[in-house]
Image (cartoon, coloured by chain):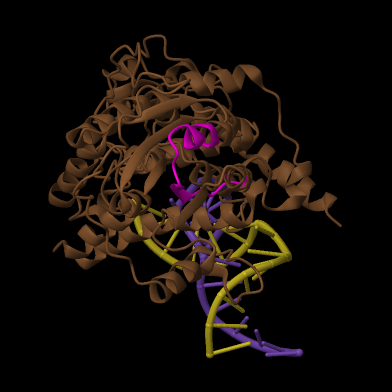
Chain colours: A brown, B purple, C yellow
DNA sequence: TTTTGAGTTGTTCGA
DNA sequence: GTCGAACAACTCAAA
């Protein structure tokens, strides 16, 4: 048997069902396709990460005299052409979640069939099957807690598959038409605090389980300590499988409360996948349809200041600069920064989602859309709209000594713990109330209390406009 | 079918 | 400083 293994968001050898099946049956041609048509919002940081990850995957495959074949363009066109060229009988892959993914799979299956090649999709690369979670229900789940409770009792976590003992190459496929060098002409990019690739993912998991899982439930919300797993970029590119993580989690002897909390966070990722599977339009449109008429502002200057981390609200700015600088942001800060954009500045969640897609190493369409919709208030399971974060209070509560803010806002390092989240009052307030030496740090872009009231008014108008 | 309790992550205000 | 209520209702899930 001669097969193609089509690597999608699963750049690893372990617990990779398509790869294991194909490797058992004979020679394998490993293929990856950069396909720009597959994302509503273009990724940026994730693409840079992925190039590094592909180099790692290629290196692993070379142990067996195999290698990764990388292409750019239309996935179905390339895979069909290559399958014919190397006389493959089957193409193996995981199923994708987005509407584009599924349309592509249908197209590919037709194209391959015409060439006498079979497409073998081995299910979703998730913990719980996003499609089956709704079986027997009249509609997909809308609330996280019952969804998660149901999945945990309905689906036993699958045991992760070991990496195949060998992945034999096809007999001398040579260089194929259109094939690119893996990692060609890529300058070395530093990923602050991360090591892309399967080996990096595995050691990150190990470190997390050993160093940070105990105490995770109570400390995860403090970005200055940041005992979070930081596995998200690895998960987004599939360098480690969620089943592997859960398996190792269950073996851990950390307190139950901490293991449960982490499993819940992974559960949110599953819930997003479930939502996206049944609502493919949610990447760009509100899940609550009446929100289509929400009045967003087109405050370009405010949006730019938010992106650049100079809104004058330290907790938000530190987050946005962490994002620019490292391609990652702590979860608590993501919520606060997102809330500030959508509620205090009144900019649409889609604008924010697009920026996150471009800048996050861990960009995941399902998570990104579901989380932004949750913050904005238009998700199925969204926060009540009046529950608006006060980003200064959030900073004082979750970064009480300003460790996090100082790390990313060097101009504020000299301020006291008491001042660090309120470095400047607005200039309308008396000079006596302003702190000294903000080193050019801007004054707040908006008054938090006024913009909060404005957000509540927008929301009330939206409600009033619905029959 | 009806009823009931609940829904990730909050803030403000007034006693 | 601390505490409870108010903030909106609504829809979902389960009994």
Q: Nearer the viewer, residue C5 or A400?
A: A400
User: Is A409 covered by the magenta stretch?
Assistant: no
Residue A344 image offset from top left, x and y in percent? 59, 34
Residue A85 image offset from top left, x and y in percent? 47, 32
Where is residue C11, by image quadrant?
Answer: bottom right
A277 left or right of A161 in image: right
User: Is A81 covered by the magenta stretch?
Assistant: yes
Give the tally of numbered discs. Answer: 0
Q: Nearer the viewer, residue A217 or A450?
A: A217
Residue A345 image offset from top left, x and y in percent? 61, 30
Name the residue rendered at 20%, 44% in the picture: A202
Where is residue A76, by image quadrant?
Answer: top right
Q: Is residue A121 visible?
A: yes
Q: Is residue A444 visible?
A: no
Name the residue rendered at 24%, 40% in the picture: A201
Q: Which residues are magenta?
A: A79-102
Q: Nearer the viewer, residue A43 or A402?
A: A43
Q: Nearer the viewer, residue A266 or A222?
A: A266
Above or below, comparing residue B15 to residue A111 in the picture:
below
Name the residue rendered at 32%, 65% in the picture: A158
Residue A20 image offset from top left, x and y in percent? 30, 52
């Amino acid at each position: 048997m001669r097969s193609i293994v089509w690597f999608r968001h699963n750049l690893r050898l372990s617990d990779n069902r398509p790869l294991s099946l194909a490797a058992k049956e004979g020679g394998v041609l490993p293929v990856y396709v950069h396909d720009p048509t597959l994302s509503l919002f273009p990724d940026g940081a994730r693409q840079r990460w992925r190039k590094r990850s592909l180099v790692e995957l290629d290196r692993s495959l070379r142990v067996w005299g195999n290698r990764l074949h990388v292409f750019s363009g239309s996935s179905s066109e390339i895979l069909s052409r290559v399958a014919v060229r190397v006389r493959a009988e089957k193409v193996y892959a995981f199923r994708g979640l987005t509407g584009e993914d599924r349309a592509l799979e249908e197209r590919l299956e037709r194209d391959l069939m015409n060439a006498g090649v079979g497409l073998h999709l081995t299910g979703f690369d998730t913990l719980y099957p996003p499609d089956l979670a709704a079986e027997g229900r009249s509609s997909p789940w809308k609330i996280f807690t019952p969804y998660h409770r149901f999945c945990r009792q309905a689906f036993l976590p699958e045991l992760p598959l070991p990496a195949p003992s060998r992945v034999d190459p096809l007999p001398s496929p040579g260089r194929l038409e259109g094939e690119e060098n893996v990692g060609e002409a890529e300058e070395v990019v530093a990923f602050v605090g991360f090591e892309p690739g399967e080996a990096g993912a595995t050691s990150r998991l190990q470190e997390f389980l050993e160093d940070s899982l105990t105490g995770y439930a109570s400390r995860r919300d403090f970005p200055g300590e940041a005992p979070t797993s930081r596995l998200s970029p690895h998960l987004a590119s599939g360098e480690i499988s969620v089943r592997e993580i859960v398996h190792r989690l269950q073996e851990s002897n950390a307190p139950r409360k901490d293991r449960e909390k982490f499993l819940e966070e992974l559960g949110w990722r599953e819930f997003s996948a479930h939502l996206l599977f049944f609502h493919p339009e949610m990447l760009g449109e509100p899940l609550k349809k009446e929100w289509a008429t929400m009045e967003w502002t087109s405050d370009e200057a405010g949006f730019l200041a938010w992106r650049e981390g100079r809104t004058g609200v330290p907790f938000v700015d530190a987050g946005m600069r962490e994002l620019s600088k490292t391609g990652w942001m702590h979860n608590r800060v993501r919520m606060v920064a997102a809330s500030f954009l959508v509620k205090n500045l009144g900019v649409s969640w889609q604008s924010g989602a697009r920026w996150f897609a471009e800048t996050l190493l861990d960009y995941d369409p399902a998570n990104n859309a579901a989380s932004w919709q949750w913050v904005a208030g238009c998700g199925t399971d969204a926060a009540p709209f009046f529950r608006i974060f006060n980003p200064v209070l959030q900073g004082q509560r979750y970064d009480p000594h300003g460790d996090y803010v100082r790390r990313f806002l060097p101009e504020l390092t000299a301020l006291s713990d008491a001042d660090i989240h309120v470095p400047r009052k607005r200039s309308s307030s008396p000079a006596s109330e302003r702190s000294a030496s903000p080193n050019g740090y801007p004054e707040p872009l908006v008054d938090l209390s006024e913009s909060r009231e404005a957000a509540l008014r927008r929301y009330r108008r939206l409600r009033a406009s619905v029959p």
